[in-house]
Image (cartoon, helix red, strand yellow):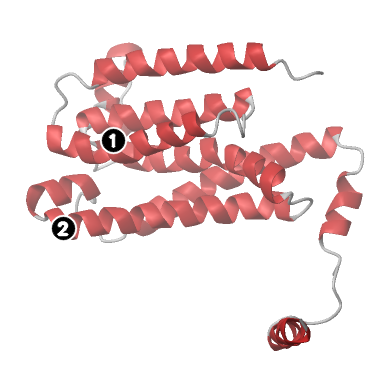
Amino acid sequence: MAFDRRAHRRFASWLAAAFSIYWLLLAIAPVDREVWLLENVLTALAIVALVVTFNRLTLSRISYASIALFLAVHTLGSHYTYSLTPYDAFLQSWLGISIDQALGFERNHYDRFVHFSFGLLLAYPAREVLLRVAQVRGFWGYMLPLMLTLSCSTIYELIEWGAAMVFGGDLGMDYVGTQGDIWDAHKDTSLALLGAVSSITIVAVVNLRLQRDFHAEWVESLRVKHQEPLGEHAVRAMIEARESH
């Protein structure tokens, strides 16, 4: 199927318009404006990156939709602050059930849901970028997106920690949103990894069924391409090559 750039651009434009309206509505009277501003810094950077790279690295509709869905989930959390997002009240009013009561939750778990969504929704865009830019294949086309997602999740936890140290007080604690759990960062990164594993597993199953050279590609990706070791041998070779010129 040929790539229709005009149709792709229309899809991206409609998606951007829908998210913009959603974001503007949730920008009105957030629970804590300072926390909202901090939460939206990375959102703004992500949107700028997507706009700047659109023509040079146009992603699939699946990737753009996944990114938009994650940003929507994050935007909702930034409006209420993660620890106060009334997901349980929403469920009770819509479906008449309390997930907190049913599962015995003693804290607000919206932040856990967002971290799981981070891995679930962003692992595929990460895979697409790695396949198209770094040209990874086979085993590495599945493992590296997991590692990249986990690394980004960990970096975000470090950013939260740094922000809490800089701003301190209630603002810092509200931004981090540990809710008294000393293992909060560990659980968040674990859920991000679980989400990424779920996403990449689905991709692997689809490719296993549809890709004819799936097994051959995996075998080739694990084959040693260069028999000579690197490290000091590569440095010596570069020095000798430089001296010869």
Q: Say what secondary structure mark 1 lies in.
A: helix
Q: Amino acid at mark 1?
A: Asn
x and y, in percent, of residue 4 in the image = 71, 15
- Residue tagged 2: 166
Observer-nearest residue: 232 or 183?
Answer: 232
54 vs 34, left or right, is right
When asked about the image quadrant of residue 240, the answer is: bottom right
Dot 2 alpha-carbon crowd within 10 angstroms: few under 14, some 14 to 19, many 20 or more:
few
When asked about the image quadrant of residue 125, the answer is: top right
x and y, in percent, of residue 238 in the image = 72, 81
When asked about the image quadrant of residue 31, the answer is: top left
Q: Say what secondary structure mark 2 lies in.
A: helix
Which residue is located at x 33 percent, y 59 percent? 158
Q: Is residue 73 above or below residue 133?
A: above
Which residue is located at x 11 percent, y 56 percent? 168
Res 103 seen here? no
- Residue tagged 1: 40
Q: Amino acid at mark 2?
A: Val
